[in-house]
Image: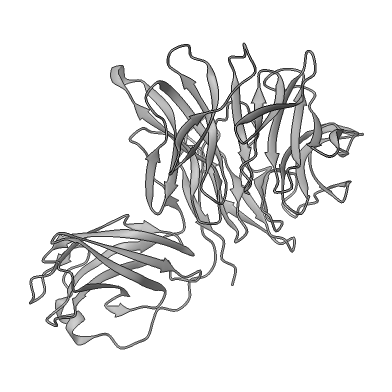
């Protein structure tokens, strides 16, 4: 289960990027009929059979993805098949798994983009089994390095977690009456964005998603403005989770593939199992937050002096062993960020001689500092096989693969005068796909993106 960013009220936003050298373009001979149908760049073309290919929705994606693409045009029938091409040459870099007829003006193609697909613009060619000249939409689809995941209409988006199916969760701002903007929990799936917030709630964010597509997060109830934890799935919809009596600030931060949810209620670190609340750590005058849970049900948590931070300590909990403070680089000081199914834990904290934050890995009950070729880094998320993402000292996002190879995954935009900008990774899956965040030139507004690391 990918890990979410650790905060009670998570801020920031995100980005997805692809790296690597593009392979050579296809060299197969172009179909003469396709070349005859091809028109000017960027527009649809009418073939002899009356097929017009206008636009594609979405119009871009990253490498190593499988998505549905709506093809909008005219003259379509049930005998149509879609193909992707570069300069009229059909390419195997984009495999069309199926073409579904919707209407005379819409087809839906399910495509799989290879991990080494050229980063360029693609034609979409529509042919008919009845014969006749195909229709072609010239350069109406693109495989890109940095992909805007889309929004509900507001200026800000953020992604916090993803699963192996490529579903991404986070938030999107949404304009309401009076010109104000509220964040709403969303899921991006198969090229589309979905608002998860039902009526009766004002705003919220989604913080994690498991492999079955169950989402967790927090939302603000309209009737009393309490912050409540929730789960959401396509089959059950939005469900509020129980909280400790009298608490008005609770949130779900992570979910494992068995459906165990970890989070907090008031000052206590808690889990929900089959919808039943269980307190795992509650200390007077301390704030405890469970931030992640692996497939074995081991929960990691952070204990702080105040709700927003201050002198954190790291701990773990399991049904068998109860609460145990974790060994970090300096006793139990520091904040754990993620745990995977191998039992590896990452976090950031001080050393005995340096109070500033150092990244660490706990493996086999032993903590060691993560020594990076990029200098001092901050780690935020961990895949089940050992990928790590975070941010370096130059405010760039980085990824470290299981072999220890490191690369920059995003670079901040050029800041406006007297401002600073940044970006970083917030979650990563077993294939090196990740989500992260990138501020605007004023160091504030940001958008959600998708990226896939490709090393050749």
For the C terminus, the quadrant is bottom right
User: Horizontally, is 124 left or right of 411 in the view?
Assistant: left
The mark tally for this picture is: 0
- Residue 84 sits in quarter: bottom left
Residue 178, image x, y percentages: 30, 17
Residue at x 56%, y 27% (from the top left corner): 241
Q: Quadrant of residue 175?
A: top left
Q: Could you tell me residue 227's position as x and y percent?
A: 54, 20
Outermost residue, bottom side: 29
Frontmost residue, 312 versus 324: 324
Residue drawn at x 50%, y 54% is 166
Determine the image quadrant of residue 93.
Answer: bottom left
The residue sitting at 70% across, 32% down in the picture is: 290
Residue 158 seen anywhere in this rendered image of the structure: yes
Please tell me which residue lies in front, 307 or 23: 307
- Residue 249 versus residue 444 in the image, above or below: above
The correct choice, above or below, for 224 with respect to 151 in the image is above
Query: In the image, 47: left or right of 391?
Result: left
Q: Nearer the viewer, residue 298 or 8?
A: 298
Q: Position of residue 261 (x, y in %)?
A: 63, 36
Image side of residue 365 versus residue 154, left or right: right
Q: Please indicate, yes or no, whether residue 444 appears anywhere in the rendered image.
A: no
Left or right of 444, for residue 61 = left
The residue closer to the viewer here, 440 or 334, is 334
**Residue 272 drawn at (x, y percent):** 64, 32
Q: How is the image coloured?
A: one colour
In the rendered view, would you say 65 is above or below 207? below
């Amino acid at each position: 289960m990918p890990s979410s960013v650790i905060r009670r009220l998570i801020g920031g936003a995100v980005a997805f990027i692809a790296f690597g050298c593009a392979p050579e373009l296809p060299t197969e001979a172009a179909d003469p009929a396709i070349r005859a149908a091809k028109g000017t760049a960027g527009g649809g073309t009418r073939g002899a059979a009356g097929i017009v290919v206008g636009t594609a929705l979405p119009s871009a994606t990253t490498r190593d993805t499988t998505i549905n693409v709506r093809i909008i045009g005219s003259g379509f029938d049930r005998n149509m098949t879609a193909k992707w091409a570069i300069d009229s040459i059909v390419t195997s870099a984009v495999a069309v798994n199926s073409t579904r007829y919707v209407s005379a003006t819409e087809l839906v193609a399910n495509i799989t983009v290879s991990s080494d697909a050229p980063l360029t613009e693609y034609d979409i060619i529509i042919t008919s089994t009845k014969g006749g000249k195909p229709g072609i939409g010239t350069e109406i689809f693109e495989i890109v390095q940095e992909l805007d995941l889309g929004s509900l209409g507001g200026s800000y988006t953020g992604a916090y977690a993803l699963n192996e199916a490529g579903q991404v969760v986070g938030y999107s701002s949404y304009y309401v009456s009076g010109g104000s903007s509220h964040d709403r929990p969303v899921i991006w799936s198969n090229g589309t964005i979905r608002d998860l917030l039902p009526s009766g709630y004002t705003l919220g964010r989604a913080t994690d998603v498991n492999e079955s597509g169950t989402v967790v997060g927090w939302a603000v109830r309209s009737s009393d403005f309490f912050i409540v934890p929730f789960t959401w799935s396509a089959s059950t919809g939005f469900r509020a989770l129980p909280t400790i009596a009298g608490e008005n600030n609770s949130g779900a931060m992570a979910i494992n593939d068995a459906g165990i949810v970890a989070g907090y209620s008031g000052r206590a670190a808690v889990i929900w199992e089959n919808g039943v609340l269980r307190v795992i750590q509650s200390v007077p005058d301390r704030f405890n937050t469970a931030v992640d849970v692996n497939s074995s049900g081991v929960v990691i948590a952070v204990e702080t002096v105040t709700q927003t931070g201050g002198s954190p300590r790291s701990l773990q909990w399991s049904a068998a062993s109860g609460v145990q403070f974790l060994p970090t680089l300096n006793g139990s000081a520091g904040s754990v960020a993620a745990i995977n199914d191998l039992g590896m834990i990452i976090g950031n904290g001080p050393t005995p001689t340096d109070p500033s934050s150092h990244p660490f890995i706990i493996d086999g009950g032993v903590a060691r500092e993560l020594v990076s070729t990029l200098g001092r880094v901050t780690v935020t998320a961990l895949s089940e096989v050992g990928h790590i993402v975070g941010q370096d000292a130059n405010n760039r996002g980085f990824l470290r693969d299981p072999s220890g190879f490191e690369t920059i995954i995003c670079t901040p935009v050029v800041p406006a005068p007297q401002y600073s900008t940044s970006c970083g990774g917030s979650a990563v899956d077993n294939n090196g796909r990740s989500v992260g965040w990138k501020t605007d030139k004023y160091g504030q507004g940001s958008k959600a993106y998708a990226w896939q690391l490709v090393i050749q």
